[in-house]
Image: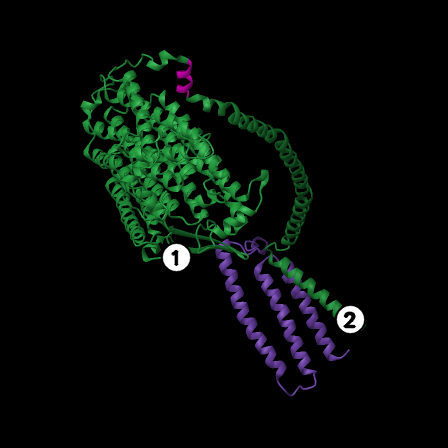
Chain colours: A purple, B green
Amino acid sequence: MTPLAGYLLVAALVFAIGLAGALTRRNAILVLIGIELMLNAANLNLIAFWRYGPHPEALTGVMFAVFSIAVAAAEAAVGLGLVISIYRHARTTDLDKMNRMKG
Amino acid sequence: MQEALQFTPQVVASSIAKILWLIPAVPMVAAGVIALMKQPRRKAAAGLAIGSLAFSLLVALAAFGHVLAGWMGGHAVRETVNFTWLQFGSSNVDLGWVLDPLSAVMMVMVTFVGLLIFIYSTGYMAHDENFTRFFCFLSLFAGAMLGVVIANSLLLLFMCWELVGLTSYLLIGFWYQKPSAAAAAKKAFLTTRVGDIFFLLGIVWLFAQTGTLLFYNKGAGSMEPLALGGLLAAPAALGLSAATAIALLIFAGAAGKSGQLPLHVWLPDAMEGPTPVSALIHAATMVAAGVYLVARVYPLMQAGMPMGGTTTALTVVTWVGASTAVFAALIAVAQNDIKRILAYSTVSQLGYMMAGLGLGGVAVGMFHLITHAFFKALLFMGAGSVIHGCHEEQDIRHMGGLWKKMPVTFATYAAGMMALAGLIPFAGFWSKDAILESAQGWKSSQGPFFLLIFGALLTAFYMTRQVSYVFFGAYRGHGDAHESPRVMTTPLWILALFAATLGLLGTPAWPWFRSFLTDRPASFELAGFSEPGILALMLTSTGVVVIGLIFGWWLYGNKSPQAKEPDVLAKAMPPVWRALRDRLYVDEIYGATVIAFYAWFARVADWLDRRVWGGLVAGVTGLFGLWARFNRFLDTYWVDGAFDKGCEELSAGGGLVARIQSGRVQTYLRLLALAVVVLAAILIWSSRA
């Protein structure tokens, strides 16, 4: 097993855990955590492909990962803000009850 | 008969002939303007009508003066202005107007008498609420009548002729609230229509034969020798030439308008209209239009006449005229309505005119037409004045002794009565004498002469009876009779003057009128009286008239009979009196024949309508109804069903899909994940293959 495959396997595992968390949890914060996990699995893939790719001397993979982390941070901040405001409004963070925007 | 050279005709139209169209056009325009006026604007309406007719009178006088000057200068004036009205294929229909002695005399008479009657009407109709409507109709009538007079085309003449008939209808039925007036208007319109159908046939035939309806058109008109020759040569049925047949057809139209037998029935009923209308339309002008028409187409009537002989057409005209003259005079004897007596007298006098045309030519008939127009208008307006003064009473048995109460009316009425009776030297004497003279000289038969002499006797008799009833004896009416206002009596004076003197234009010594109409120079010769037979005839006719007067005075003078009391003649010979009083049952005969037939025909048509045509229509309707029902069935159960079903399915499908959008974020996410997995599976699977 090549080191790359090992990284990818771990990343896939983390993604699967994140997806399972995002899909099964009712709590909005836990869903956000799941999404964060999937994001970081993708970051791990980016780094791994860069490190074992044809041009490891160019810092493209790190660039991608840093961007992704920055965006994820912003996203987490906005997401948590939304959750808090929803909680203030509806006194719950249960996503099954947040269905008032359905058509 | 003086032998003089025929004048050379002058064909170039003068400026007065060119503006001749103004004579009918101005009153017509005035009628149109009055029609738009509001009812309360009485003064304006009457002023406009009178002003327009006065203008026409001035133009007519100028035209007459022009003709007169030409005549005195020694050339016959016959100026025509023609223009093409319609063009179809190679033939065209021309209209135009003509200025010749005949039309000049007639237009002056119509405008002059018409003007006096207009003025009189302002007094007579003063209290009528439809005053402006009355003047609108009067103006329209004057315009149409003048159109008849100046027309140089049979078609234009016919159009104006029908307009005249229309205004006659409108004016007879002017008081349309009265059922009798409405019925009389209808009767007049329908009866004259019978004659007009024949007239129209004659026009169409004439056009088919000659290709023109113009009377005079520089040698190419239908009344000029070229066309007449062709008409004489063309055969019609029963051994008549086309000329005779057309002449008879046109005469039928004239008989309808002029109340000749057997189409006279409408004229006495026409007296339901206001009295000025009776005077203007049903005595002086419109009914004379038939006579004028015969005079206008006289060349056609006369076509093919051998020297000193007569033609079939003229013979018919003569006999119809003479019989009408006596027939109507007989009926007039036994009438009690002041206007009805005058109406029958008008019919009788129109018979004289027709007979005069048939016997002695245009000048004789037209002379009586002109004099009659004056004295009959006078009589009618006098009768109107009497009716007005006696509070709308028309029965002569409820009058009497009016000569003291209405002196002006009496004096003028007496002048008119003597002119009508034919007493020397009043106008009627000379014109009637000319007719009698021609009748005496007629080669075919002496019948018309005796008929006309008898008619003269009757005329004198019934007029004496009427005047005795109305003006002498004791007053038997209600209320107090009063003289009419000056606006009514002034026209009476003027007309009385003419009734007394107009005949002097046509005495045997100075036959000016005849010379003028026949384009010969006139000369004054006392020797005219000494021609063989003339003096004797004058004495005879005067004798006959005097007998009639004396007889009438003997029976009716100063008797003042009670209204209920039967007439003297009724006591003497009841059956004859009853027959005459009931107008010789002509209306009843028409009722039993023509009207009964039409009523039957109408019933048959009604039955056909209801049963046959109605059934057909109902059948077709049912068929279409069935078809429509079938279509509705298709619509409801097929088209609509299919459509509705499609819509339901679509909506159900939408509902199904809408369930996905549940608003649960995680469901969306799940679907997203599932889609990604499927996508990944496809990608992997396809890269393998």
Span highlighted in magenta in the image: B575-582
Left or right, B613 with respect to B582, comes to right
Question: At 61% across and 85% down in the image, what residue appears?
Answer: A59
Disc 1 sits on a residue from what chain?
B
Q: Residues within 10 Å of mark 2 (few under 14, many from 20)?
A: few
Find residue B157 and report its horizontal and vertical position in percent.
42, 45
Residue type at mark 1: give it: Val
Residue bearing mark 1:
B11
Residue type at mark 2: give it: Ser
Left or right, B500 with respect to B292, comes to left
Residue bearing mark 2:
B686
Residue B282 quadrant: top left
Disc ID at residue B615: none
Q: Label 1, label 2: how many angstroms apart (C-alpha)?
A: 113 Å
Question: At 66% across and 82% down in the image, what residue appears?
Answer: A50
Q: Quadrant of the C terminus of chain B?
A: bottom right
Find residue B526 and report its horizontal and vertical position in percent.
27, 40
